[in-house]
Structures are given as C-alpha cells and as structure tokens.
Image (cartoon, grey):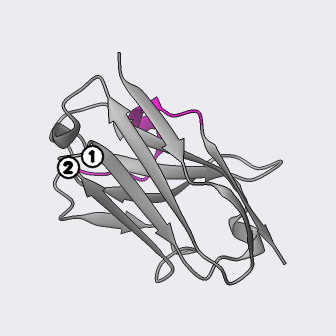
C-alpha cells in the first residue's frame, strides 16, 4: 500500500528555516502530483503547497508565498518543503499527501488527495 513518511520538523526561532521531507512508497511516485497541508492547534487542516508530478507546476497558499519552496526528486521518491523566514503562525503539524488520480495536476483541496502521512510537528517560537 501507499506509505508517506514525513521528517524534518522541529523547533525553530522566528525567522529561521526548516526543510521537510516526504518519502513515498507503494505507487509510481512520478505519476502523481503531491502536496503539503498543515494543521495548527484548534484549527482545520489547510493547504500549504502542491507540486505537479514532474515539478513543473507549483501552487502556494498566499500565506507562504515567497517564503516556502516545494520540490521533488522523482529518482528518490521524495518531496521536499523548504521553509524560510518562519513565523509563529507557521506552527502546526505538516502533512504530505498524494493525489488520488495519476497524471492530474496539484490541487488546493483535501478532497483532491487520497493518501496522507502521519505528519511532522513544526514549532516556531517568537
């Protein structure tokens, strides 16, 4: 079955950086667009970014544009999220996810995606 494993979360001071990774297995990685969502305490899970299967198309939430960069290495079956200039409001559990339909582009909505990782905690201290 499809497995997604996130890593790279942690505690960082405001203004700092973190790089998250998502290792995928169980399906042909390069056939599926992927995404990152996050969930802050007491809030609903929200879209952060999405990337097409070859990496040529990326989508970002307005709140992270210019600070976060999504990328993928299809040879390593891994997606990355480089997070710079972190703010306390970026705190939350970050989840990677893969689209339910092969060859489809990235989407903004949870319903666009099918498999989810267990999440990795990111805490930004002020």
Residue 33 shows which numbered tag? 1
Q: Position of residue 118 (x, y in %)?
A: 58, 33
Residue 80 included in the magenta stretch of the image? no
Q: Is residue 112 above or below residue 1?
A: below
Label 1 to label 2: alpha-carbon separation: 4 Å
SS for dot 1: loop
Proximity of marks 1 and 2: CB atoms separated by less than 8 Å: yes
Residue extending farthest top: 1
Task: Identify the image quadrant of the N terminus.
Answer: top left
Frontmost residue, 58 versus 123: 123
Q: Residue at x 47, y 44 (%)?
A: 96
Crowding at mark 1 (Cα within 10 Å: few <14, some 14-19, many 20+): many
Q: Is residue 77 left or right of residue 15?
A: left
Q: Is residue 69 above or below residue 25?
A: below
Where on the picture, by quarter, is residue 30? top left
Q: Position of residue 99 (x, y in %)?
A: 32, 37
Residue 5 shows which numbered tag? none
Residue 107 included in the magenta stretch of the image? yes
Q: Which residue is mark 2?
A: 53
Image: magenta residue range: 105-118
Using the rendered image of the protein, determine whether residue 4 is visible from the camera's viewpoint.
yes
Task: Report the number of numbered marks.
Answer: 2
Where on the picture, by quarter, is residue 14? bottom right
Where on the picture, by quarter, is residue 3? top left
């Amino acid at each position: 079955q499809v497995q997604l494993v996130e890593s790279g979360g942690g505690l960082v001071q405001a203004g700092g950086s973190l790089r998250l990774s998502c290792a995928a297995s169980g399906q042909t990685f390069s056939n599926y667009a992927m995404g990152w969502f996050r969930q802050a305490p007491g809030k609903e899970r929200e879209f952060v970014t999405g990337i097409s299967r070859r990496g040529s198309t990326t989508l970002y939430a307005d709140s992270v544009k210019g600070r976060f960069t999504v990328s993928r290495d299809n040879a390593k079956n891994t997606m990355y999220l480089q997070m710079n200039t972190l703010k306390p409001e970026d705190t939350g559990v970050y989840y990677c996810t893969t689209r339910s339909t092969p060859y489809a582009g990235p989407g903004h909505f949870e319903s666009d995606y099918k498999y989810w990782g267990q999440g990795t905690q990111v805490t930004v201290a002020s």
